[in-house]
Image (tube, grey):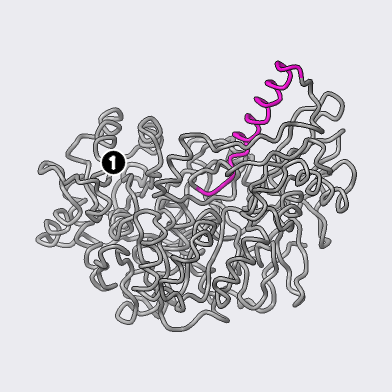
Amino acid sequence: MPFTSPSFVPPLAFDPPDSIPVSEFFFGEHERQYGRHPLSESKPPFTCGITGKSYSAPEVKSRVEWLATALAAELGWTPNEGSDFDKVVAIYSINTIDTLTVSWATHRVGGTSAPISPAYAAEDVRSQLAAVGAKAVFTCVTLLSMTLDAAAAVGIPPSHVYLLEIPQQVSAGLSAPPHIKTVDQLIHGGKGRNIIETVQWSGGRGAEQVAYLCASSGTSGFPKTVKISHRNVIANAMQTKTYESQWHTKEPEFCLGLLPQSHSFGLILVCHGNIYRGDGVIVMPRFDVQEMLEAIDRFRLARLYLIPPLIHAMIKTPDLLSKYDLSSVSTIVVGAASLSAATVETLARLQPTWNILQGYGLTEAAVVVACTASHDIEFGSCGSLYPGYEARLIGQDGNEINEYNEPGELFVRSPSVMLGYLGDGAATQENLTADGWLRTGDLVMMKKSRNGHTHLYIVDRVKELIKVQGLQVAPAELEALLRQHPAVEDVSVVPIEDEVAGELPLAFVVRIAPYISRDEDDLEDELRNFVKDRVASFKQLRGGVRFVNSLPRSTAGKVLRKNLKEMAKQQQRERVVNGHGKDTETAGKEELSVDAAFAKLIGKVEIIEFDSDEE
């Protein structure tokens, strides 16, 4: 029997509608029917965290209409003619207060929005534009040159490249060329035209038509483009509001919009989920600790959506934190990776009134599957299932697991689950069953909380399991254990080859400050014994421990295990060349640094992406 959300979670008040586009659900005339917080009583949907510029909810509604009218004229589109795949508008930009206005205007003309990560290089942008069949692109001035080149390569004329406004503080001194139209110019032009006809859909169309084409690493680790329907987005917004209704304030509040609008977590949860309940998003175009703290203080933010590297950056600057009034914050929602016990304890000491809620989601589920409830917090847990979700665990033998504390691969079903992968029927068939079950590729187990509620715990990626003498070792299990040691700030466990065992677990460890001066041989012995006393023999760290300054992470905050595996292989090769053999028990412990490209990124982080995948 499938697992479902706990008893304290009410069911969805109504089935997510399948006959209207996202733009109509969020800004239409049927607020009471669809449970949306009244526009007139809502916070401004998006406010620039640097300049303070914003538009009220009614103003955003008007801007969507005018921009849709302008796009219809510019591109020759009408709302009720042509396929959604013939009307794809890409957005390749850092976060702005008008990004969602562009997406909703695209929906308003019956088209599809295709967000592209601003972390992408030129070839990635060209490939994604070609893959989605984009007919127009919105970008920002700092990415304009690359966008024009990529657009030209796929046949998009310069006249169909448009600019989103960004603050001068992040524009690198660049300004909009006179021949490139801006969003505001388009809106001004649309304001002088007759509003286009409304979208007329029959029942079921919203469950079939694509609202967003989102890039994902895929549940098997290979890049794919996910087709997310209008009903998928609507469903997850409803699920979020319903799940949190028992403790979330009834009055609108402000939240942090630092996570990228180009990724499903920032796009669907932060933007759509919060706007549905009348909250306002304070948009940050880049990550800067001081700018973020200033925004929290200035706008009295109540909720922060973060990933572990951002939290690490915060707790390493306690003096800076003390300069700002952060008392408005009640909750931080963490995704992408687990927090160590030391990190949680440090943050709790610095900000004892903050609730730390960890969640789990993936682009293919559009997007949140489970989240911690503020009254039912368990360390290491991803919380409980959202309403409307069913979950099954499948064991290695292919049989369903109905017991608690038994790991199995997670399959989920929900009205928010994707339509499939664009242009990849084989991958869709492999990961999505005919009756709507999504194969996540994650190994999880269900446990009871101290309050008796069912919680979801990530054990590992199915593909990441280490095979030691034919027995499976989950890196996440060892990582969770090591995070309990006071010396460990961050950790990742990867396999290294071994002639006898096949593979052995190797831990890359980032030490907390007081332990950096500690003798490395002694500390390695302590960590290995710490693990040895708590796990079976085949799970021990026989591959050794490497101490590093930092772990290589993607812009999503995910540890790049493939980089660590390559580092381990390289060290192993060097030891053989230098005559040290393959003695993994006494492997070297030299201090390693993250690769130069990643170090450059960390010094200037602007983009944060989110996915359940490790790569």
* Left or right, residue 585 beside residue 516: right
Residue 500 location, x and y as percent? 87, 26
Among the 4 quarters of the image, the one containing residue 574: top right
Q: Residue at x 35, y 32 (%)?
A: 122
Q: Which residue is mark 1?
A: 143
Q: Quadrant of the N terminus?
A: bottom right
Element assignment for label 1: helix
**Magenta stretch contains residue 558:** yes
Say above or below: 360 vs 163: below
Say above or below: 567 vs 234: above
Majority secondary structure in the magenta region: helix
Q: Residue at x 38, y 30 (%)?
A: 123
Residue 80 location, x and y as percent? 29, 53
In the image, 70 versus 59, the foreground residue is: 59
Residue 84 location, x and y as percent? 36, 47
Range covered by the magenta-colored residues: 556-579
**Magenta stretch contains residue 570:** yes
Q: Quadrant of the C terminus?
A: top right
